[in-house]
């Protein structure tokens, strides 16, 4: 505790009565401590950076390449749109294939699976009362 200045005895006694610990903390000492710690931090950062640079040179690690953006290539103009006639024919073929699958019997010899028309399957399920 610094004793080179006068202490207000009444204020000191009040602080002790309120369970405060009387200390004399110099702002100059705090500022000096913060400055020294800051300088130590900067020195450590610079030393670390220098060490990394020296080690990368000694180990032969190449410098990282900077990314150079490529020139943007020209995109083809507009989407390729199917003509109305071709689109209608394609949709008609798709629907015909779907209808063929749900309206006709088919069998697959390789897997041994047999498909029956949807209406027949629904009637069989309704007659049995369950799907098996």
Image (cartoon, rainbow, N blue to C red):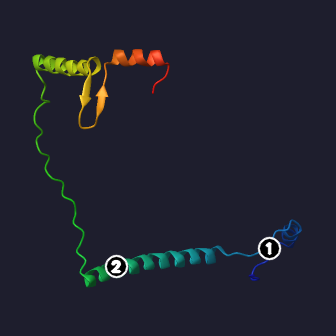
Residue 36 is tagged as none
Q: Which of 121 and 74 is in front in this view?
A: 121
Q: Nearer the viewer, residue 21 or 26?
A: 21
**Residue occupying image coordinates x 13% and y 25%:** 81
Quadrant position of residue 55: bottom left
Structural distance between the alpha carbons of marks 1 and 2:
48 Å
Task: Name the element at disc 1.
Answer: loop
Judge from the rendering whether residue 104 lies leftward or rightward of residue 119; answer left or right.
Answer: left
Quadrant in which the C terminus is drawn: top left
Q: In which quarter of the image is the N terminus?
A: bottom right
**Which of these two is toward me, 112 or 46?**
112
Vertical order, 58 against 87 (above or below) = below
Residue 97, horizontal then vertical, whole percent: 21, 22
Crowdedness near tag 1: few (<14), some (14–19) or many (≥20) residues, C-alpha within 10 Å:
few
In the rendered structure, the answer to whether residue 41 lies left or right of residue 58 reads: right
Indicate which disc, 1 or 2, sits on the residue closer to the N terminus. Answer: 1
Rate crowding at label 2 as few (under 14), some (14 to 19) or many (20 or more) other CA atoms within 10 Å.
few
Give the x, y percent position of residue 89. 13, 18
| Secondary element at image label 2 | helix
Q: Report whether 72 appears left or right of 118.
A: left
Which residue lies under the disc numbered 2? 52
Residue 48 position within the rendered picture, expressed as x and y whole percent measured from the top left: 40, 79
Q: In which image quadrant can residue 66 be found? A: bottom left
Q: Mark 1 points at which residue?
A: 22
Q: In this view, does 7 lie to the left or right of 98?
A: right
């Amino acid at each position: 505790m610094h004793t080179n200045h006068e202490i207000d005895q009444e204020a000191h006694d009040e602080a002790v009565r309120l369970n405060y610990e009387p200390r004399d903390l110099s702002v100059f000492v705090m500022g000096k401590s913060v400055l020294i710690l800051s300088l130590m931090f900067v020195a450590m950062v610079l030393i670390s950076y220098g060490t990394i640079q020296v080690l990368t040179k000694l180990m032969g690690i190449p410098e990282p390449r900077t990314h150079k953006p490529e020139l943007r290539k020209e995109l083809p103009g507009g989407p390729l749109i199917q003509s109305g006639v071709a689109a209608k024919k394609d949709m008609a073929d798709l629907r015909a294939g779907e209808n063929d699958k749900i309206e006709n019997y088919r069998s697959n010899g390789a897997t041994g699976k047999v498909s029956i028309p949807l209406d027949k399957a629904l009637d069989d399920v309704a007659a049995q009362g369950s799907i098996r």
